[in-house]
Amino acid sequence: METSVINSENTRNGLIIELVSLFIILPIVLALPIHIGIKLLLAGVGLVFIIYHIVVSKLYRNIFSFVSPKKSFVKRMLFIGLSIFFGGAIMVYYYDSSLLFSIVKNKPHIWIIILFVYALLSVVPQEIIYRHFFFKRYESIFEDKNMFLLLNMFCFSLCHLFLMNIMVLLLTFIGGGLFAYTYQREKSMLWVCAEHTLYGYLIFTLGIGEMLAFPT
């Protein structure tokens, strides 16, 4: 019994060290002014590590299986989406009216690329790593689920640190909370990706992305 407890504690400590290394230390290092080659190497090692454990643990099974969404989720997503659209439009207009729908008017080709590629190259990888993998691998080692949720929000925000923008960090912290909450409630990667995609589309379409210096 004592050996089992020790092994369990060692496993927990190992997972905590792993979490801190991958989701806190690595994003901070990647934001430092170091050679791009070193950044790519470190990011590649981290990504390979995560993919390896997703494959070994078979976390890819039925990852995007369809689950009927709760009515409360649909209502919440529509409410937040409409709030982003109207609130964001007003904010961008008064900040700099020339930015409102600027990407649609001035860079329609980039806008189309975002509509068709953004979900696959940004949303899906982020949600697989920061929701599916993060929750499946680390949630069980935290007794306080609210603390775990805050940690997930913090780590998701931290992965945007390289953009060096306080507003981006704040918005991704809030967004991370919404996506984590959806993942917990809906138990569906499909719906959390749909939600993430919708809000991202609205942010870039309205011109909020350019206002916050998101790369477009």
Image (cartoon, rainbow, N blue to C red):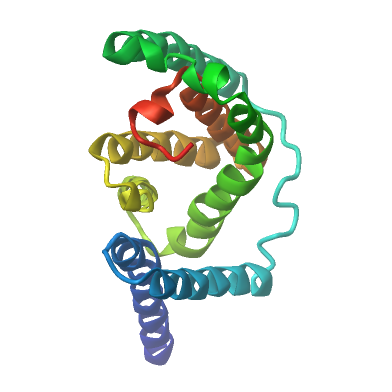
Quarter location, residue 188: top right
Residue most toward the bottom? 3
Q: Residue at x 29, y 62 (%)?
A: 28
Q: Residue at x 39, y 75 (%)?
A: 38
Quarter location, residue 99: top left
Residue 124: image x %, image y %? 61, 47
Indicate the quadrant containing the N terminus: top left, top right, bottom left or bottom right: bottom left
Residue 156: image x %, image y %? 39, 49
Pick the residue in front: 59 or 42.
Answer: 42
- Please say whether residue 188 is visible from this viewpoint: no
- Taking the image as shown, residue 65 lies to the left or right of residue 197, namely right
Residue 135: image x %, image y %? 49, 55
Q: How many labels sit on residues?
A: 0
- Taking the image as shown, residue 51 lies to the left or right of residue 65, namely left
Residue 210: image x %, image y %? 40, 29
- Please say whether residue 27 is visible from this viewpoint: yes
Placement of 50 over or under 172, stated as above or below: below
Q: Residue at x 39, y 13 (%)?
A: 98
- Taking the image as shown, residue 6 lies to the left or right of residue 188, namely left
Pick the residue in front: 23 or 138.
Answer: 23
Pick the residue in front: 50 or 26.
Answer: 26
Residue most toward the left? 166
Placement of 198 over or under 185, stated as above or below: above
